Every structure is written in structure tokens, then in C-alpha cells.
Amino acid sequence: MPRREAELTNWLALDCGLSEFKLVPASGDASFRRYFRVQLPEGGTLIAMDAPPDKEDCVPFIDVTGRLERAGVHVPHIHAQDLEQGFLLLEDLGDRLYLGELSGETADRLYGDAIDALLRIQHSDGRGLPLYDHELLWREMSLFPEWLLERHLGLTLAPAERVLLEQSFELLSESALAQPRVPVHRDYHSRNLLVCEVRSPGVIDYQDAVLGPLTYDLVSLLRDCYIRWPAARVDEWLNDYAERALDAGLLAADDRIRVRRWFNLMGVQRHLKAAGIFARLWQRDGKSGYLADIPRTLGYIVEVAESTPELQPLAELIGKRVLPRLEAA
């Protein structure tokens, strides 16, 4: 048995008082965290998180869990914790990810539930959360040229192309910073939402939460890097959210007409970041599972950029320089 797994087993038995349990790998993620399903002799299950302290900090996860629980969001309750070893014992929300449950027939219901939960997240206590500021927005978008264009595709950008990207990044940052500021999950999509028998959806992977733009989580949900929906359906869900955010006081009446543009530009910012992260996961970490999602992610950028005059040069760069090289790779 690997050392970390043996230490986790010992902690569950001695510190958590569990006996005759079985550990089964549940999932990993894009970080160094690992999850195990703890199968109990009476038939119940829990989730054990292994977050090596030299690589992961559990404190933000614990902090945000408390904030979201108090707001009525169904997040995994923390039953036990050992920060020194990097172990947490959590409620098991199951394994019915939205990604496997979404269909043309279920989407309205599931996205309706997800928007309910999103509004609760946005009403949660955001005091003291890191700010989604200009520096962070730029740092995220810079992953696109560094990891996707240069390291993954081997492209050398001309000076004019670098200027083009900088101008696009600035436009996207200004739009994001103009929006109302709310607690932001940062990865609110179909792989981090679970269908639950009660209080669905269950929400996971929120430890990187920040205080930032109103539409960020919404675009993560509706223009998901892992599943794509017709534009007309996305518009319906966007309008439903906007009306409910207006009623909830999250959105001012004067800003209602700006929501669509904010949503579109926020999506470009997020998808530039995501495309860079997917390439980095392969180039740096040897994780190839996200490479197949890059074309869909770039497709969202091109779709919005082509219909946004200020971003049309970006659409042209991706269409003429990036996508052909990506297909060849």
C-alpha cells in the first residue's frame, strides 16, 4: 500500500474511529488532491480527501465550505479534519455528475436547479475572499499564449499578434471588472455538480473561490467546456438567470441590458484561461484527458469574437493560426 494511503487508512481508523471500512479510489482532479470512497460495513459511504500539505492547502476548502453551507448550498459536510497531514473526511454526495445526466429532456430541470444553487452562492458571505482583480484576470488569460500557443502548438507570435492579444485581454478585463462583484466558485460546471436525491445539486471543487464578476460562474455553467448547447437554449437560461438576479437584488435594473455582453466577454476570458490550463495539464503534468476539450473551448471564443467587432482580430488569429495547428497536432 502506498505511504499516503497507509497514513490515510491509519487516520480514519485511529482518529475518526472507523472500523472494517474499505477504501476505493473515487476520483482525482486537476490538482494534487485525491479522493477515496470510504465504504462502511453498515452500507453507508463517506469521502476521504488526501491533499498533501506540501502541495495543497486545505484551509480555503474548509473556509469556503462553511460559507456555502451557511448560505444553503449543498456542499459536502466536513465530518473530520487533520490539516497537519492534509486529510479531510467528507459527506459523500454520490457520483452522478451533471455531465452524465444532462440531456435534451433533463437540461431545463437540472440547469434550473443549478441556477438556484448559483444564486445562493452569490448571496453567500464574500468578505475576505481573494479579489478577482485585474492582475488575476490577466494572469489567467496569459496561460493561453504561454501554454497552448507556444509550448503545446509551438507557435511563435509576431509582435503585432502579441499586441492583439494584449488589447483583447484589456477589453475582457475591463468588462469583467465593470460587473457587480459576488462570490465566485470559479469552476461551476457539469463536472463539479452532482445530481442528489435531496437538495440537488451537490456542489464540489469550490476551494479557489474569489470575489468577482457576476457572470463568471454563469458562463462556466452555460458555456461548459465539456458539453455544448444550442445558442437559443443558452439564451433562455441566461434570461431566466438575469430576471432572477434582478429580483434578488444581485443585478441593478440599469445593468440588465448589459448582462448579455458581460456574459459573452466573460466567456472569452474564461475560455482563454481554460484552453491554456488544458494544454498545461498535458505539457507540465502529463494529463492528456483534457486535450479533446480544447477545440470546443476555442469554438466558444471564435463564436463570440466573430460577432464582437473589438474581438474579430482574435477570432481571426484563432481561426487561421491556432485551430489548423491544433488539428495537425
Image (cartoon, helix red, strand yellow):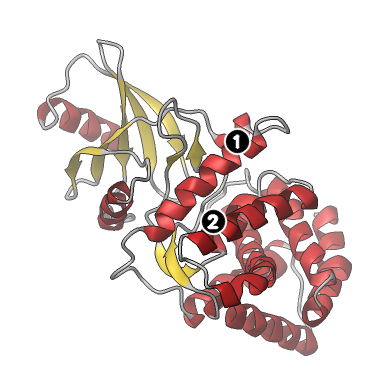
Q: Are there few (<14), some (14-19), or many (20+) residues within 10 Å of tag 2?
A: some
Q: Nearer the viewer, residue 164 or 300?
A: 300
In the image, is residue 210 above or below residue 20? below
Q: Which mark is residue 34?
A: none
Q: Which residue is mark 1?
A: 109
Q: Secondary structure at mark 1?
A: helix
Q: Is residue 300 left or right of residue 267?
A: right
Kindly identify the residue that appears in the image at 67 percent across and 85 percent down: 166
Q: Is residue 83 left or right of residue 175?
A: left
Q: Which residue is mark 2?
A: 244
Q: Earlier in the sequence, mark 1 or mark 2?
A: 1
Kindly identify the residue that appears in the image at 61 percent across and 79 percent down: 175
In the image, is residue 305 above or below residue 40? below
In the image, is residue 121 above or below residue 169? above
Q: Nearer the viewer, residue 101 or 165?
A: 101
Whether residue 283 is visible here, answered yes or no, is no
Q: Nearer the viewer, residue 112 or 276?
A: 112
Q: Nearer the viewer, residue 131 or 50?
A: 131
Q: Secondary structure at mark 2?
A: helix
Kindly identify the residue that appears in the image at 30 percent across and 47 percent down: 69
Kindly identify the residue that appears in the image at 54 percent across and 56 percent down: 244
x, y percent for residue 185: 45, 57
Whether residue 266 is visible here, answered yes or no, is yes
Q: Is residue 90 left or right of residue 251?
A: left
Say which quarter of the image contains residue 267: bottom right
Q: Quarter holding the C terminus?
A: bottom right
Tag 1: amino acid:
Arg
Q: Is residue 197 left or right of residue 229?
A: left
x, y percent for residue 91: 30, 32
